[in-house]
Amino acid sequence: MEFPKSPSKDKRFVNRKWILRILAAILVTLLLLLGFHLESGYGRNGHFNAASYYTVVVDCGSTGTRVNVYEWNIGVISNGSLPILLNSYPDNSSTTKNSLWKSSCQYHCMQTEPGLDKFVNDSSGVRNSLEPLIAWAENVIPREMHRETPVFVLATAGLRRLPGSDAVRVLEDVEVVVKGHSFMCRKSWIRVLSGREEAYYGWVALNYKMGRFDGYQGDRTFGILDLGGSSLQIVVEVDNGAGDDSHVMTSRISSIEHNIVAYSLPAFGLNEAFDRTVLMLRNSQIAEGIGSVSIIRHPCLMSTFAQNYTCNSCSAFDATYQKNHSQPNETKPRSLRLIGDPDWEQCKEIAIASSMNSSNTKVPHPNAGKDCEASSFSHIGGLYGIFDRLWNVSWRC
């Protein structure tokens, strides 16, 4: 004969089961939250991200204005005292691409053209260049982090070559645009970099990317040749005390001291160097033209090339050429049309002349001697003198 179970015991058993189920559900929820936290907290290379932050850098070059967004880890110190770069944008993903995407940029960039140096006393031109870039950065960065995200607007050779008052006016227009957005900004973060600063930051960026600041005393750093539109930067690390004192700088990164030689050469960027070749050809060729348009046959361009060309630097080069050749200050047309007329030997001559900032294509060609020991040709000037000095302090084949 079975006796009926006590109702009070049965009720206690049911209540205990519900309590266990609730506790299990809470535990599972906590584990899921912990797992999500850990998963989102680990960045590249397995480093834990206690937190991350963003920076926006607007690069105002001579040929265009570009924007990059960087996400950094600040939870764990890595590489000595250096933060960990988690992500940089734009990247290869289709989500970052829009009408500003320039596939011709090997490092991926969102860009507007031309450079800001073309917008002196033109506030609307500055605004039209910057607005789409900053708006794009705002879409990349989570909205709740906008107020904590600094934006740096750094101009290079395009604005460096302007008279100081003109550069100031352009930067004031830039400040108005930037402060109309949600990012954190200070006036001192909107400025023109000196040539040495530009060279140094390029060297730091390359060697950080290549892992050369990981804290090993014996690691050799990479030198750079940074060919911009208007200027050329050359940077290389040297032995203690080597090199020209006016170009040597000391930098301590990850507790290691680096002595580097940094040169910035105005007018040796790709566009200005090419403008010099155009001017040399214009002054040496028999005049051809249609109306006010001068036709220039260029030996470095393929035979199918035919295009109108604006020589932005020709006015400055003209003044130097006329002074050196005692020519009267005559007015020459700025409207040009380039026609490809390939001739390798002539192309090589004008390229060498341009690299030495010469208006004469018939110049001696310096050569490297036996076992890569460079001959002395610093008297020629231009790039060759600098390479000669750098070779003596650091370079060997």
Image (spheres, helix red, strand yellow):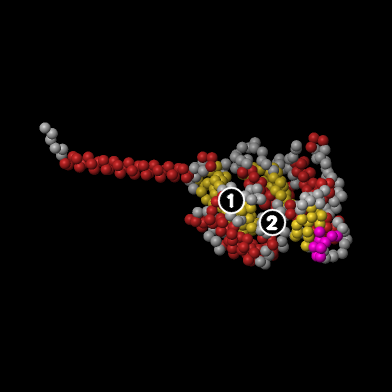
Q: Which residue is mark 1?
A: 90
Distance Cα–Cα, label 2 vs label 1: 19 Å
Q: Measured from the top left, where is residue 115 in percent x and y?
A: 67, 59
In the rendered structure, the answer to whether residue 329 lies left or right of residue 153 reads right
Q: Which residues are magenta?
A: 287-295
Relative placement, left or right, of 62 versus 36 is: right
Q: Is residue 394 above or below residue 298?
A: above
- Give the mark nearest the N terminus, 2 or 1: 2
User: Is 288 colored magenta in this rendering?
Assistant: yes
Q: Secondary structure at mark 1?
A: loop
- Residue type (three-letter) at the residue carrying disc 1: Pro
Q: How many marks?
A: 2
Q: Residues within 10 Å of mark 1 (few under 14, many from 20)?
A: many
* Residue found farthest to the right: 326
Give the camera-side residue of 167 and 11.
11
Residue closest to the far front: 304
Residue 133 locus on image (x, y percent): 59, 57
Quarter of the rendering occupied by the N terminus = top left
Residue at 33%, 43% (x, y): give it. Answer: 25
Q: Please state the horizontal and vertical placement of residue 171, each as a whole percent of the image.
A: 64, 62
- Vertical position of residue 333 compared to residue 67: above or below: below
Give SS at disc 2: loop
Determine which of the numbered discs, if any, sits on residue 63 in the image: 2
Residue ID at (71%, 46%): 225
- Please identify the quarter of the rendering in which residue 237 is found: top right
Quarter occupied by the C terminus:
top right
- Of the residues shown, which amino acid type is indicated by label 2? Thr
